[in-house]
Amino acid sequence: MTARDIVASFTGCAGQRCMAASVLLVVGEQPELVARVVELARALVPGSDGPLAMGPVIDAAAVTRIEAAVRGAAQSGAELLLDGHASTTKFAARQAESGGFWVGPSIIRHRSAGDSALREEIFGPVLSVLHCADAHEALAIENASAFGNAACVYTASGAAAEFFAQKFAAAMIGVNVGVPVPREPFSFGGCKRSRFGSSDITGDAAIEFFSTRRKITT
């Protein structure tokens, strides 16, 4: 379930949505998980129909930006576990056939939390992977991000779920949920550089936005 949710999160809408996963922090050695994520992402095909389909990105500028970020990561010493441009020829073939803006999913294994592809918003089907020694290192890396839209933890431990849920510096938290969008009665919105405007856009925050508080003193 974890690998499937991760792939669905970072490739849904070709990674061009506000709730797309972009960073996978793996606590300890979990080679089976990483291998399964790569396997599922490699199986995706260009298109809009079927469970394995992934659509195009918005324009040529997006293709250029995404491919430049992946290329830059490789040149800086990161390992490309899956290269959406070079090895996923089915997406390149679809682009040649349709004239659309197609780029395959990429998975980058980083050696440093300071790598730009891991810290910056690429806004495409790219997943940065970094191995962490323990939960405290993973939390420190996550909370150091300039963005704070969402953060998720996948675990079978209630204690681990509570630890991360209480300490994540993000506005929307998921526990074993790849896209932690709150249901309608609750507010949707991020924090830090992921915050847009003066408040969240749904729930009581939206009512507050369209309201004027009046105070009468007698």
Image (cartoon, rainbow, N blue to C red):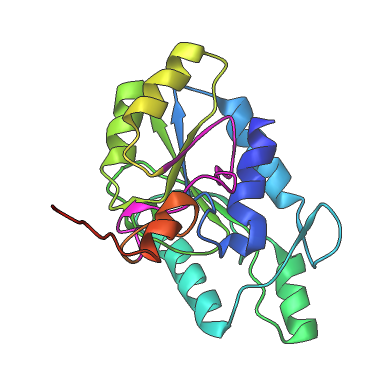
Q: Residue 68, percent across and down?
A: 45, 71
**Front one among 171 and 30:** 171
By secondary structure, the bulk of the magenta-drawn segment is best described as loop
| Residue 200 among those drawn in magenta | no
Observer able to see residue 133: no
Q: Position of residue 32 (x, y in %)?
A: 63, 26
Is residue 175 found inside the magenta-colored segment of the image? yes
Task: Give the residue at x 77% y 50%.
Answer: 43
Outermost residue toward the bottom in this view: 99
Res 201 → quadrant: bottom left
Please provide the residue range marked out in magenta: 172-196
Instruction: Name the image quarter holding residue 208.
Output: bottom left
| Residue placed most toward the observer, 90 or 21 | 21
Quarter holding the N terminus? top right
Q: Is residue 112 left or right of residue 124?
A: left
Percent coordinates x, y for residue 191 in the rendering = 32, 51
Seen from this angle, which residue lies furthest front? 218
Note whether 43 is above or below 166 in the view shown: below
Residue found at x 40% / y 54% = 205
Residue at (80, 53) in percent of width and height? 52
Residue 122: x and y in percent read 44, 63
205 versus 58 height, above or below: above
